[in-house]
Amino acid sequence: MYPADRKYTKDHEWIMVESGSLALVGITQYAQEQLGDVVFVDIIAVGSTVSQGGKLGEIESVKAVSDLFSPVIGEIVEINNQIMDHPELINEDPHGRGWVVRITPKDPLEIDSLMSGEEYMDYLATIG
Amino acid sequence: MEQILNRTVLYESHLANDAVIVPFAGWEMPLRFGSILAEARSVRASIGMFDVSHMARIWIRGNESADFLNWLTTADVHKTGLNRARYTLLCDRFGGIIDDCIFYKLSDDEYLLIVNASNRDVVWNWLMQWKSKNFQSISLEDRTMEISMVALQGPRASSLLDQIAPGLSESIGRFRCVEADVGGIKSLVGRTGYTGEDGFEIMPASENVLQLWSLFKNLGVTQCGLASRDILRLEAGLLLHGTDMDVDRNPIEAGLERFVDMDSESVCTEALQVIERQGTKDRLVGFQMTERGVPRHAYSILSGNQVIGFVTSGGYSPTLDRNIGLGYVSSNMASPGSELSIDIRGKLVQAEVVETPFYSYRRV
């Protein structure tokens, strides 16, 4: 359920390092289940730098508006245009095609300090 | 204050079917069973059902029943035929909307009034007050707990009903009702609803409602919760009392004039005649977003940089694939095409006034 190729936050985001200095950020399966149908995504501008835990944007479901936080300090280099027109991708494939932003993390050590998939599942068990 | 919440007879069934349960108007109700949008789409494309047993069902009996209802509602009740259902408003003597409701004429001296769950006590007290003042001969009975209600809605509703009770749908015209046998379950069946689709509201004795629900479920009817119902009614331009209107609003500003008989002799007629003559400062309108953004309840509506009203209902419409809403604006900004902006958490996003309903099954 929670792949080992990425790290997870207590705010239910994931971050996956790609080749080079880029990483993808999205929300977890748990988060999308809690939100229900996502109908709208708004992300701050490409080129913006966000701090760890800083606001990347907002994800709106039918009933609620939720903030999306950055797992690490970094610069936004790309927004997944597909989810702008098809926010339901976040529900359908949150760990894949429903990724939200591509960033350049400034500090690789920050990523290491986040939870592994197994740790995240243990964490979910404590809040569930 | 801790409030003890009511549960419908179907509550255990909803839990067993993975419903997300929320408190609503004093009841524990299913918000959704699965995807809210999928539930809404099922009703538009095919069929869905809702447990609406939380709505209050009040019987009015006695030979003064019609006079009583006529005095308290905006409808000309005397013109209402037998086995007819009518949407109407209960207004106070200032014209303020106490509740919107549907009444069924079951016989010359028996009416059923369906009231919003959130207004059950207020309406009951209002009815009792007038009964003791001017209509002592009538009797009032709240049978909300002993009679349940299931709304079967969607383009396939009539054929599915006929599958269980052959010929039944044809015997019930729109906004009419009959006593019928639905798969062995005696029920009052009205061809009414709150989704903008053809459909039925079926009222069996509460001890039989689980059997009815299971019967529909086994025939593949999608179980739907309050959230999809809210989307569907918004698309159909149907107002929600307590959200789109309340006792501080009158039917004229809420755009409900067509449900007001201005010649009727009712507690609110004089006030409404004055309001109609003078016009209203505000007007409830439908709008659609012309830029990206989701309007939600209580967001401000602006013209230029001036606040001219607020959003009462809003959200994403899966049927239209567009963000839509209802809200009060200054009457001079109420005509279709007027450009507005919505203050979405500090950001002004463009919208325009459009005709309601946003969606009508008769048009497609």
Image (tube, helix red, strand yellow):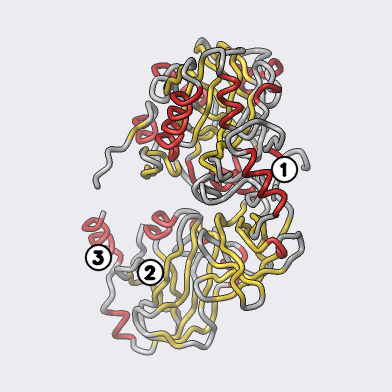
Camera-near label (2 vs 1) is 1
Image coordinates of residue B192 in percent, x first then y, are: 62, 29
**Of the residues shown, which amino acid type is indicated by label 1?**
Ser
Relative vertical location of residue B291 with respect to residue B76 in this rendering, above or below:
below
Camera-near label (2 vs 3) is 2
Which residue has dot 3 on it? A119
Q: Are the residues flagged by discs 2 and 3 from a single subunit? A: yes
Position of A41 compared to A32: left or right? right
Q: Chain of mark 1?
A: B
**Of the residues shown, which amino acid type is indicated by label 2?**
Glu
The residue lying toward the viewer, choosing from A105 and B153, is B153
Q: Secondary structure at mark 3?
A: helix
Image coordinates of residue A58 in percent, x first then y, are: 47, 70
Q: Which image quarter: residue B343?
A: bottom right
The residue lying toward the viewer, choosing from B267 and B222, is B267
**Of the residues shown, which amino acid type is indicated by label 3?**
Glu
**Which residue does the image show at 29% across and 85% down from the upper left?**
A109
Image coordinates of residue B285 in percent, x first then y, are: 67, 56
Which residue has dot 2 on it? A13
Relative vertical location of residue B11 with respect to residue B3 in this rendering, above or below:
above
Q: Is residue B39 visible?
A: no
**Which residue does the image show at 57% across and 29% down from the upper left?**
B152
Mark 1, residues whose alpha carbon is within 10 Å: few (<14), some, or many (≥20)? some
Which residue has dot 1 on it? B360
Cα–Cα span, label 3 and label 1: 50 Å
Q: In what quadrant of the picture does the C terminus of chain B appear?
A: top right
Mark 2, residues whose alpha carbon is within 10 Å: few (<14), some, or many (≥20)? many
Q: Secondary structure at mark 2?
A: strand
Cα–Cα span, label 2 and label 1: 40 Å
Cα–Cα span, label 2 and label 3: 14 Å
Sooner in the amino-acid sequence: mark 2 or mark 3 = 2
**Which residue does the image show at 64% across and 48% down from the upper left?**
B235
